[in-house]
Amino acid sequence: MALRVFTSILLVLSIFFMPFWLSVVLALAGMMYFRYYIEAVFVFLIGDLLYGAAEPKLYGVTFALSIMNLLLFICIEYIKPKLKYYS
């Protein structure tokens, strides 16, 4: 439990102070390690609210990172029980 709280705090701090790619790697690692790591979706929603801009390539969607993170979360949670190493 303490590890999950620590990683959640680290993820929030990474959104504010670290490069974007490092936040994505930390979120992916958290989603793979913990069960239902929904904190990543909310943290990227905060990141989109702070730094998000409409992306012309994605038809002007402002919350593109949050939507992609939510879809990735759903896919990972669907695939995790099918993996051998995950109990």
Image (spheres, helix red, strand yellow):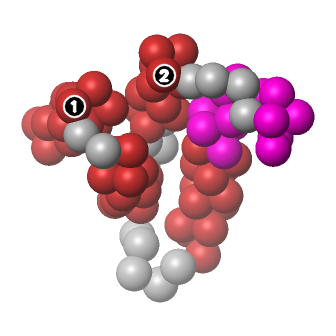
Q: Which mark is residue 43?
A: none
Identity, as a three-letter code, of the amino acid under mark 2: Tyr
Q: Mark 1 points at which residue?
A: 17
Disc 2 crowd rating (10 Å Cα; few below 14, some 14-19, many 20+) is: few
Most foreground residue, 44 or 54: 54
- Indicate the quadrant where residue 54 lies: top right
Q: Is 1 situated above or below 9? A: below
Nearer to me, 49 or 42? 49
Q: Which residue is drawn at 19% across and 36% down?
A: 10
Figure quadrant of residue 85: bottom left
Asked if residue 65 lies in the magenta stretch, the reply is yes
Residue 33 at x, y = what percent? 34, 59
- Quadrant where the N terminus sits is top left
Q: Is residue 52 within the magenta segment?
A: no
Q: Give the range drawn in magenta.
A: 56-68
Looking at this view, is 75 or 27 the one in front? 27
Query: Is 52 placed left or right of 24 in the picture?
Result: right
**Against 79, is 74 above or below?**
above
For the residue marked with disc 1, what is the amino acid?
A: Phe
- C-alpha gap between disc 2 and disc 1: 12 Å
Outermost bottom residue: 84
SS label for mark 1: helix
Q: Can you tell which mark lies on residue 51? A: 2
**Residue 86 percent location from the top left of the image:** 42, 72
* First reached walking from the N terminus: tag 2 or tag 1: 1
Residue 70 visible here: no
Q: Which residue lies furthest to the front in this view?
A: 56
Task: State the image coordinates of residue 35 (x, y, percent, origin top left).
Answer: 42, 49
